[in-house]
Image (spheres, rainbow, N blue to C red):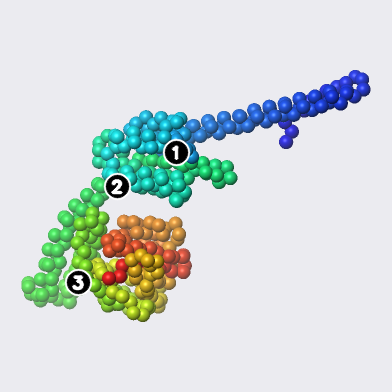
Amino acid sequence: GVLGVIGVAYSDALPPAADLETLALFATQAAVAAESRRLWQALSSGRDQLASIMASTREGIVLIDTERQIAVANSALNHLCGIDVPTGRTSLSHFLASWGESATYPESEWQALAQGLEAVATGAQEFANGQLNTSAANACSLEWTALAARGEGASDGGQLLVLRDITQEKETERLRQDLTSMIVHDLRSPLTSVLTSMDMLFRGISGGLTDVQHNILTVSQNSALQILDMVNILLDISRLEGGSMPLNLGTYALEPLIEKAASRVVAIARDKQIAIQYDYAPTLPEVRADGDLLVRIVQNLLDNALKFSGRGAIVTVRVAREAHDGQQPTLRVSVHDRGIGIAPKDQGKIFDKFSQAGERRGGTGLGLTFCKLAVEAHGGTIGVASAVGEGSTFFFTLPVA
């Protein structure tokens, strides 16, 4: 674009060529000066905007240059780390050492932060994240994210470390877990007593029952059993999360356990005229697992598939070997339905407690959480592949015996 115009008027003939060259040189220098000023103003504006963002955000932000020096750090970082973070020629290692002197985080979490920063710095990972948890009154529990900073043309621009205070979130989660634990323990005993009393009535301890009385008592018993089942799932989730649930490990063939799980939901399948089909790979090895937990995992996944399938649909259970590439061999169990499916934005949260995705509502939102924790307790993984309107496939892996 045009930056400006220089006008020169002569009363006589055209000036000598040397004067014209001088004039052109002057115009060029003036244009360079004007462009430099414009760029400087743009740079200053961008710098001021960045400084404003850095100062106003509650996240701690530190930019580490390619020489592993602290280039920029905001005031929130000082608060979250509990130290004054110097900039300039301060090295990342010096910053971590100074922070570590006052930190009360577990050694494993501290090492994970250092390893994450190293992995991003060397290009082994684009980003890394984790948590630093503490119960100290004068310190914050933090969530950290390290990611590569890219310069112009995707060149290496160092890395960015972002810290977020999750102390309040952790406290809220702890209080919720305490409340859940209290409710579970306080409900379980009276529910058991209620069910025992109902069983005694069914057995005629107080005399025979009329048909109306029998029907009313049956409805009450079924409702109480549903509540007890929810209480037991909450208790199991609490134990699995705390690592205190014992696993009664044994060696099992998967086929009988899967069909035992299917027998527990056959009434639901029959009511909706849904067929449950099995697709087993030949000569499957056995797995080492807690048989009862494994049956409950498959039962939950089947119940989930039946719930969101239409009348006359087909639900398929498949078991196949996983490619292990020299790792521990595993089997992959999948439950496929042709139901309503799950939107991509919801797939990442359906294994969270009390989470219900989109149209997939109903129930407590605890079954998939239990499945995830129980599978992971066996050293396996769980996931979902789904498309809206095309159905879902929930799958998990288990190490072979």
Residue 82: image x %, image y %? Answer: 33, 33
Instruction: Determine the CA span between mark 2 and mark 3.
Output: 53 Å
**Displayed quadrant of residue 185:** bottom left
**Displayed quadrant of residue 136:** top left
Instruction: Determine the CA span between mark 1 and mark 3.
Output: 70 Å
Residue 316: image x %, image y %? Answer: 38, 75
22 to the left or right of 353? right
Circle 1: is it few (<14), some (14-19), or many (20+) Cα within 10 Å?
A: some
Q: Earlier in the sequence, mark 2 or mark 3?
A: 2
Which residue position holds label 2? 108
Amino acid of disc 1: Arg
Front-most of residues 196 and 25: 25
Which residue position holds label 3? 218
Please, what secondary structure does the residue beneath circle 1 have?
A: loop
365 to the left or right of 91? left
Q: Is residue 148 above or below residue 373?
A: above
Q: Earlier in the sequence, mark 1 or mark 3?
A: 1
